[in-house]
Image (tube, rainbow, N blue to C red):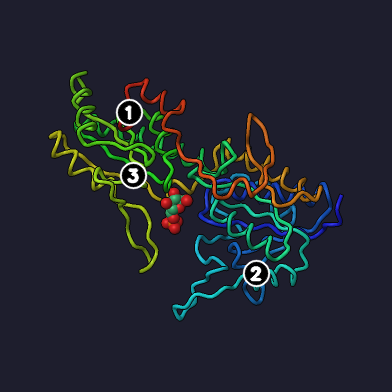
Amino acid sequence: MTSVWRLGVLTSGGDCAGLNAAIRAVAYRAIRHYGWSVFGIKDGSLGLMARPLQYQELSLDLTNDVMLRMGGTMLGTTNKGDPFAFPMPDGSIKDRSGEFVEGYHMLGLHALIVIGGDGSLKILDKLCKQGGVPMVGIPKTIDNDVHQTEFSIGFTTAVNVVVEALDRLQPTAASHHRAMILEVMGRDAGHIALNAGIAGGADIILIPEIPYSLAGIAAKIDEVRAEGRSHALIVVAEGCRTEGGQAVTVVLDHEQRRYGGIGHDLASKVSEMTGLETRVTVLGHVQRGGQPAMRDRLLASAFGVHAVDLVAEGRFSRMVAWQDRGVVDVPIAKVVGGSCCVDPNGAVVHAARGLGIYVGERSP
Ligand code: F6P
C-alpha cells in the first residue's frame, strides 16, 4: 500500500442520481477499510481554485445510509468553468489551472477521485497530469456516453423517469387521439431515448445517430392507424437534427448553447403531414433528479470501492468501468476522445426495429 492518507473527492459536470451514493462509497472504503481522511471538494474544480479553499471533511456520520438514496450531489458541481480557459467576470478568459494544483497541495492531499462525465474526466485528467496530481476517475452521466464502460452512474434513473413519463402520456394520448412527442436529454447520444422508448412502448424513436425522414414518421403513423389505433407515442432525443440537418438549440444565460426545441419543431410538421393533433412534453432536468435506481446505487457503490482500492494500489490515471457484469479499470487515456454513441447496427436498434418501431432510415 502507498502512503496515501488524505484523499480528495469531487463531482464534476452535470449532476445525476447516484452521485451521493458514490461519494458515500468512497468515504466508507477509504475511512473504514484504509483509515484515511477524506475531503469532499465543493463545486467540482472550483473548490480547489477558490481562496479560501472550499471543501468539507467527510465522516462516516455525514456519509450515512441516507446518502445512498439522495439525488443530486452533496458536494455541489459545475459544468462550466474549464480551469484551462476560465471565463472571468470582465469577459476575459484566463488559464487558472495552476490555482487548482496549488489548492490541491494547500489541502495536503495525496490523491484525488473525480466523479465525472467524459468532458470532466478529459479536463481533470489533463489538469492532474500537468500538475502531478495522482487521480482516479469514476464515470457518471445520464447520457451514458462514456467510452469503455457499459453503464455510467445516473443513466438508469434517467431512463426510468422517461419510461414513467411514457406510461403517463399513453393514456392521455389514447383518450384524445393524439400524437405525444416526448423530448428527452442525452446530448449527442441517443441511449436515453432508445432504451426508454423501447421500454415505454414508443411507436417512433428518433436519435442523433440515425437520420430520419418526415415521410418515414408519417408512414409509421399511417401504419399505426391501419392497425386500428388513433394515437402514437414519439420519443425524440434532444440532439436530433431537423430533417434538413440543422441542430436545434437554445441560448441560456446569454452565452451557453444547449440542445432544446426539436420536439416543438417536429410537432407542427407531424400534425401537418398526418392530420393528427400533437402535444409536446420536454422532460428536461427531471431526468437528472430523484432517488437513484437500483443499478445506479450498485454502480456507485462498486465504483467507489474499486476507485479507492486503485488509489491504495498506487494505480492512477485510470477510470473504473462496468464491463461483462463486473467492475474493471481502464486507462483514462483510452476513455477520453472515444465516443460511445448508439450503434446504428447494434442489438438494441435491431430490437426496436424488430418490434416495428420507426427508428429512422436504415443505412443502405
Ligand atoms: O450531460 C448531461 C446533460 O443533462 C445533457 O443530457 C443535457 O444536454 C445537459 O446536461 C444539460 O445541461 P445543463 O444542466 O447545463 O442545462
Question: Would the CB of label 3 be found within 8 Å of ligand 1?
Answer: no
Position of residue 265 in the picture relative to residue 14 (left or right): left
Which element carries disc 3, helix, strand or loop? loop
Nearest-to-viewer mark from 2 and 1: 1
Which element carries disc 1, helix, strand or loop? loop
Q: Of the residues shown, which amino acid type is indicated by label 3?
A: Cys
Q: Of the residues shown, which amino acid type is indicated by label 1?
A: Pro
For the residue carrying disc 1, how many other residues have a C-alpha within 10 Å: few (<14), some (14-19), or many (20+)? Answer: few
What's the mark number on residue 364? 1
Nearest-to-viewer mark from 3 and 1: 1
Q: Earlier in the sequence, mark 2 or mark 3?
A: 2
Q: Of the residues shown, which amino acid type is indicated by label 2?
A: Phe
Residue depicted at 62% across the width and 68% down the height: 47
Q: Which residue is mark 3?
A: 240
Residue depicted at 19% across the width and 23% down the height: 225
What's the mark number on residue 100? 2
Question: Residue 133 location in percent, x, y?
Answer: 72, 61
Position of residue 246 in the picture relative to residue 346 (left or right): left
Q: How far separated are the C-alphas under marks 2 and 3?
A: 36 Å
Disc 3 to disc 1: CB gap under 8 Å:
no
Above or below, 317 against 234 in this view is below
Q: How far separated are the C-alphas under marks 2 and 1?
A: 50 Å
